[in-house]
Image (tube, helix red, strand yellow):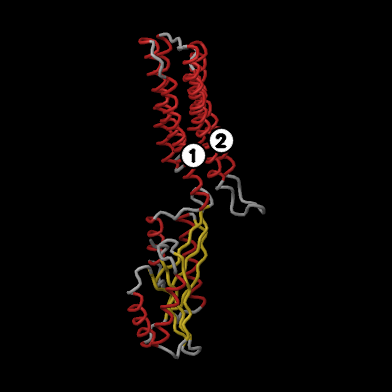
Amino acid sequence: MEKRDQVIIKTSIIGIIGNIILVSFKAIIGFIAGSISVIMDALNNLTDALSSVITIVGTKLSNKKPNKKHPYGYGRIEYITSSLIAALILFAGGTAIYESINSIIDHFKNDTLPDFQIYSLIIISAAIIVKIALGIFFRIQGKKADSENLIASGMDALYDAILSLSTLVGAILAYFAKIYVEGYLGIIIGLFIIKSGIEVFKESLSSMIGNRFDKEIVSNIKSDVNKIDGVLGAYDLILNSYGHNKNIGSIHISVDASLTANEIQKIERKISELLYTKYNTIMTVGVYAENNDLESKEIKKELNSILAKYKNVLQLHGFYLDKKEMVCNFDLVISFDEENPDDVISEIKAKISEKYKEYKFVIVFDQDFSLS
């Protein structure tokens, strides 16, 4: 199977060649006909070619090996290049609106009208078909390679096809009916392009901040870990992305309190190997000891009855009763919908402490990183 970076680079090179050809033809037509909309359309295709160059550079840099300065690698560079592509899209949209307004002003001042020929209309029509094909091709390859940059470029190409279509409409009206509309169409399409740029930028910014991982991946990881012999439960799964399919994370497992350190290490090694080979994730494993004597079960049952009244408490885990130290530890996962999680924990602690005064209750507040 073709490697991801090869798919991205080959697709981007095709995009560069296609867009340079479109720029050449449109720029010539625009200057000959004196059409600002065609010239702006050519400029927009030029930004697409630059986007493909940025994508290639970003792909190459993201594959650099980790080093002392950047031990997690360079995978996140793809998020930065996606933001640069968004900036180019916004620039193209803003330029289209600016030049369209100037064209409208010039039309009213000097009664100017573009001078198109039939061959110009044919070339613009062909350019629309080429741009649609490039847009669809980029999106298909982007999904195949799981590349935000290619998907963003594909979206931009499809918007460009709409822009070229408006240019064609303006050219047809100017040629056959001597009606000026291209400036107005340019403003409308410029706004659509800006909208596209904002969406691409929001997506790349969200990735840089840190998105919640896909529910299916989270569910599959927990399911696989729970299948390992000796694991009684998998909790607190945290995943951090450092580029495409490059993750570092942590997970807690509960095991029987009677297991030896040697037995626990064997379980931990199996989990680490599983996560690395199947999910390309470097995983740190924490351990909860689980006791199941009658008193522990009684306190846990009472605790669950208390928690049932709190809709934003998503999970109880890591329960351990230390009778020697007279301490009971457990973790609570609380939803992000809860505005005052500390208050909720204090209430729960007060209620369970009232019931079992002889024990000290230590509650750890866990963020909802992957449950909901």
Kind of residue at disc 2: Ile
The residue where tag 1 is placed is 149
Q: Label 1: few (<14), some or many (≥20) within 10 Å?
A: many
Query: Toward the viewer: 314 or 141?
Result: 314
Helix, strand or loop at mark 1 = helix
- Which labelled disc corresponds to residue 354? none
Q: Is residue 192 above or below residue 309?
A: above
User: Which residue corresponds to the image point at 48% horizontal and 21% vertical from the top-left?
Assistant: 22
Place residue 212 in its image quadrant.
bottom left
Residue 88 x %, y %: 53, 33
Considering every residue shown, the one lying at the far right of the view is: 68
Residue 37 x %, y %: 47, 20
User: Which residue corresponds to the image point at 37% horizontal and 19% vertical from the top-left?
Assistant: 169
Are circles 1 and 2 on residues that touch, CB within 8 Å?
yes
Kind of residue at disc 1: Asn
Q: Is residue 367 above or below residue 8?
A: below
The residue where tag 2 is placed is 54
Quarter of the image for the C terminus: give it. bottom left
